[in-house]
Image (spheres, rainbow, N blue to C red):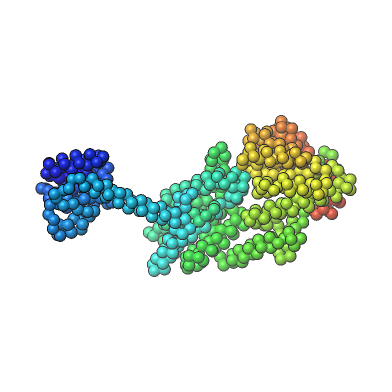
């Protein structure tokens, strides 16, 4: 844009710049110049200083005050070649000045140079802004990152110390998120994280405080620390009830089913809470304590929030020690394979055994699978443990076959991590060759959700296992993500009805309907059915009414070691079950 009250100069500037390839907007006075600047997208302004009404200096001032005019190059044109006029031009925001008379052949070069300079400045500023964004914001979710969170929390603690206020730190971890990554893939997991981040942001942005006092707690920031870990801190806490309501709001919002692609995904959060100055006075200790409390929430059943207490430090230390001990358990010969009977209730004999790992630690004694399996899954140790179980179960099956139990089928669980590793097939083939077992007597169990990611590749993986002569079962059927269109394409032999549908089978019409549907589906696909978690005669009776006779559960015995299992092989379950039903 060019502005000059002298029509000759105005015309010459416009014609010269247009000849240089610029699109020019002209104005003959200051008011028109300001109006044109606001109306159009201007890249550079050329202003005559000496104009009636609004002078060039005033126009420059007004442009700099406008949001669009902060960084626009402004070239002041003046006939007053004196120091005071030039100094004033720079003081009010002029980029440069050009004296009259103008050397017309040079004006186009001057304008082009100023535009290039401004472009370089803009690019530098954008680069700095981008670097700042990368340093302080999470690239996946757009939330503040760990560095941003720690910096702001540090400043809030200083303020809270001065004003004698309390702060609350909430450490949020998504329950069993690793299972989503392992089964549906990391790209799908990223979509879940982005959805959860949006839910957290919206939930906490709409939060207006819950304290009955005039001092309302404020959600100062929600951030993503990394992985599936998020954090929130609240300042101006009046009572712990303030934190309770916010934490419960988060649980309620995040726990609602998420529709992502064709899947309905259920994600729940476990939250640990640490309070300043009650629990700690430094950023590091506040975060550490909130993390400890979060793990306690997971141990207490997940999808809940727990406050930090000093006694939890012992639990956190014990978990770390248990992880370290578990890493040595295989080499120290602390693991053992137990076998749970799979019974044909109609014939009354054991037809199979599910191999289940047990751990008797030198340091901790007997450790429940419910305690060490989650640690193994979180750390990736489950793959090595799974390979060890496969080797030992196949060696035991070989011994039983030599004793004459040729029809006994041994089932071995394969974790999603183990299944996706490229070494499963070669390891399986090596074990089969080493043990020389009847291959049809081995059955690998995979969870329904483990095979649903990369369906095409997984069908190929499963077929390669089948080509080795090994049977395949889908464990926990009915709880995962599969559909009929996919299930019929998988080369599987058996479906195992999950225990969650068996618990209330005798009293729940819904569970009866689900079990009946699974049985009908299996029959249509010519698959065997095993019901797991059978604990009483009433459940067994309903299953037998629907044609299921292969069952597993505490009604027939818990998992036992190989020696005790051998003693069960001659047991007549048919007579025992008949007596129980009578």
**181 or 580: nearer the viewer:** 181
Position of residue 119 measured from the top left corner of the image (x, y, whole percent) = 32, 49
Position of residue 268 measured from the top left corner of the image (x, y, whole percent) = 56, 49
Residue positioned 57% across, 46% down in the render = 186
**440 or 93: nearer the viewer:** 93
| Relative height, residue 493 to residue 209 (above, below) | above
Residue positioned 89% across, 48% down in the render = 403
**282 or 181: nearer the viewer:** 181
Residue positioned 73% across, 59% down in the render = 330
| Relative height, residue 508 to residue 386 (above, below) | above
Residue farthest top in this picture: 524
The C terminus sits in image quarter? top right
The N terminus sits in image quarter? top left
Whether residue 362 sits left or right of residue 321 in the image: it is right
**340 or 106: nearer the viewer:** 106
Position of residue 504 measured from the top left corner of the image (x, y, whole percent) = 68, 43
């Amino acid at each position: 844009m060019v502005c000059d009250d002298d029509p000759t100069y105005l015309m010459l500037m416009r014609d010269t710049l247009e000849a240089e390839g610029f699109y020019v907007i002209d104005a003959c006075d200051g008011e028109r110049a300001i109006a044109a600047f606001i109306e159009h997208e201007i890249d550079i302004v050329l202003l005559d200083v000496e104009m009636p009404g609004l002078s060039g200096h005033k126009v420059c001032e007004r442009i700099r005050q406008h949001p669009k005019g902060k960084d626009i190059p402004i070239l002041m044109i003046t006939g007053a070649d004196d120091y005071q006029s030039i100094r004033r031009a720079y003081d009010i925001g002029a980029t440069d000045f050009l004296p009259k008379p103008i050397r017309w052949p040079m004006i186009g070069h001057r304008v082009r140079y100023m535009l290039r300079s401004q472009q370089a400045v803009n690019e530098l500023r954008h680069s700095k802004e981008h670097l700042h964004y990368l340093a302080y914001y999470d690239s996946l979710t757009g939330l503040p990152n760990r560095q941003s969170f720690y910096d702001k929390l540090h400043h809030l603690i200083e303020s809270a110390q001065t004003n004698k206020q309390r702060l609350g730190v909430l450490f949020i971890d998504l329950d069993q998120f690793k299972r989503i990554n392992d089964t549906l893939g990391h790209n799908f997991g990223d979509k879940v994280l982005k959805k959860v981040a949006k839910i957290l942001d919206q939930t906490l942005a709409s939060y207006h405080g819950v304290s009955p006092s005039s001092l309302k707690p404020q959600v100062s920031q929600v951030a993503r620390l990394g992985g599936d870990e998020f954090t929130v801190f609240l300042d101006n806490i009046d009572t712990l009830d303030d934190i309770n309501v916010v934490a419960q709001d988060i649980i309620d919002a995040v726990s609602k089913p998420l529709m992502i692609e064709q899947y309905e995904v259920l994600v729940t959060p476990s939250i640990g809470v640490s309070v300043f100055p009650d629990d700690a006075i430094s950023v590091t200790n506040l975060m550490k304590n909130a993390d400890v409390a979060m793990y306690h929430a997971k141990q207490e059943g997940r999808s809940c929030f727990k406050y930090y207490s000093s006694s939890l430090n012992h639990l956190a230390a014990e978990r770390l020690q248990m992880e370290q001990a578990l890493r040595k358990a295989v080499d120290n010969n602390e693991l053992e394979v137990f076998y749970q009977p799979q019974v044909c209730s109609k014939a009354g004999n054991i037809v199979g055994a599910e191999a289940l790992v047990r751990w008797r630690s030198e340091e901790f004694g007997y450790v429940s699978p419910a305690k060490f399996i989650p640690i193994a899954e979180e750390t990736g140790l489950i793959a090595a443990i799974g390979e060890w179980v496969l080797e030992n179960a196949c060696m035991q099956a070989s011994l039983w076959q030599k004793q004459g139990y040729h029809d006994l089928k041994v089932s071995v669980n394969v974790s999603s991590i183990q299944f996706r590793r490229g070494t499963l097939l070669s390891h399986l083939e090596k074990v089969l060759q080493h043990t020389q077992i009847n291959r049809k007597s081995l059955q690998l169990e995979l969870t329904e959700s483990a095979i649903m990611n990369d369906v095409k590749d997984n069908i190929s993986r499963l077929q390669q296992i089948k080509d080795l002569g090994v049977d395949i079962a889908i464990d926990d059927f009915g709880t995962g993500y599969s559909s009929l269109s996919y299930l019929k394409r998988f080369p599987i032999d058996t479906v195992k009805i999950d225990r969650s549908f068996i618990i209330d089978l005798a009293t729940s019409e819904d569970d009866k309907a689900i079990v009946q549907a699974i049985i009908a589906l299996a029959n249509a696909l010519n698959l065997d059915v095993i019901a797991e978690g059978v604990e009483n005669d009433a459940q067994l009776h309903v299953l037998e009414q629907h044609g299921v006779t292969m069952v597993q559960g505490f009604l027939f015995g818990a998992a036992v070691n190989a020696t005790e299992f051998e003693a069960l092989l001659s047991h007549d379950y048919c007579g025992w079950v008949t007596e129980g039903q009578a």
